[in-house]
Image (spheres, grey):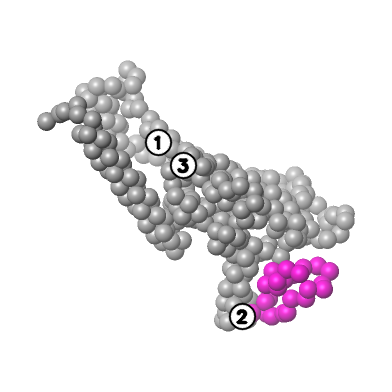
Amino acid sequence: MRTGAPEHRRVANQLSRRVKAALEEYRQEHWRRFVESLNPDDNSLWKTQKVLRTTRKPFPPVQGETGIARTNRDKAEAFADSFQLQCRENQLDDEDEDHNNLVERRARRLDRLPDDDEIRIIFSRRPTQRRAQEVTINGEAIQWSNNVKYLGVHLDRTMTWGHYVAETIRKAKTARGRLYPLLCGDSRLNLRNKLLLIKSVIQPQLTYASTAWGHACNTHLKRIQADENIALRTATSAPWFVRNRDLEWTPVQEVIKVKAAKVYAKATDHENPLLRAAVDYEPDRAATHKRPKQQLLDPG
């Protein structure tokens, strides 16, 4: 029975607020359990990152002979025509021609010139690159480059990792921009879930292949750390005098060091003698040029 009595409206409003609070708490708890269940071993973390970073494309409409099929009858006829074309009798002449075209396309692909990321490079710390003899494919010279991309990692000529750090920060900044509605102060996510988002989406981008470049100069590592700090400040919306260490958060530089320690521990006990020999040395803090195991040392 509906009533307009003030006491009844007050009780109804209180119950409505309780229901909304309970629903919000349930959504937060459900999201927290989902983020905590993400695991890089079963590809669940990778799939979630792909969904959050990729703009979903709309499903294309069904096309019939007269245009877009809008009614159920037009859609059924469009599907029937498609199945009829798929189930028609095979033409051997067409198959032979298609096969020949496929072979020709494959041959042209193998004979093509390398792309821009497949050009030559000599790794050296010399101030000027000394050119070796020219390498040609089909009579055309392959151009030199100051950086190449291999397995998602940009390798510059002097192996100082400046170009790769810049690309990593650019990708992390793009991911942070797409997650901004979930990380900003107006978001309904609690701080715990925001930190889980940063840890599962942004931090893996900043630490990708970190064992290879973790010994870069402190300037590059500080840029990586600064990008993570921006994400943390966005999530907390805290004033300037509140430090990130109050979050009990493991900084990205410490994460890089922990990952490197695990990798080198496995390499030391590996069955491959070449891999064991590659890590069989002690890092020297006073060395002019850093070696990969230098990242295991405490900064100083």
- The residue at 56%/46% (across/down) is 237
Question: Looking at this rendering, what residue extends furthest in the left direction?
Answer: 1
Instruction: Establish if 117 lies above or below 7.
Output: below
Percent coordinates x, y for residue 58 in the rendering:
40, 32
User: Where on the picture, by quarter, is residue 6?
Assistant: top left
* Residue 269 on the magenta span: no
Say left or right for 18 vs 180.
left
Q: Earlier in the sequence, mark 2 or mark 1?
A: 1
- The residue at 79%/58% (across/down) is 158
Q: What's the distance in space between the residues labelled 1 and 3, CA to CA?
A: 58 Å
**Pointer 3: what residue?**
187
- The residue at 76%/69% (across/down) is 300
Disc 3 residue type (three-letter):
Ser
Residue 268: mark: 2
- Give the residues drawn in magenta, as a range: 276-300
Of the pair 29 and 14, the residue shown nearer to us: 14
Judge depth for marks 2 and 1 and give the one in front: 2
Kindly tell me whether residue 164 is visible in this rendering: no
**Pointer 1: what residue?**
94
Percent coordinates x, y for residue 123 in the rendering:
78, 60
Are the two marked residues, 2 and 1, in contact with CB atoms closer than 8 angstroms?
A: no
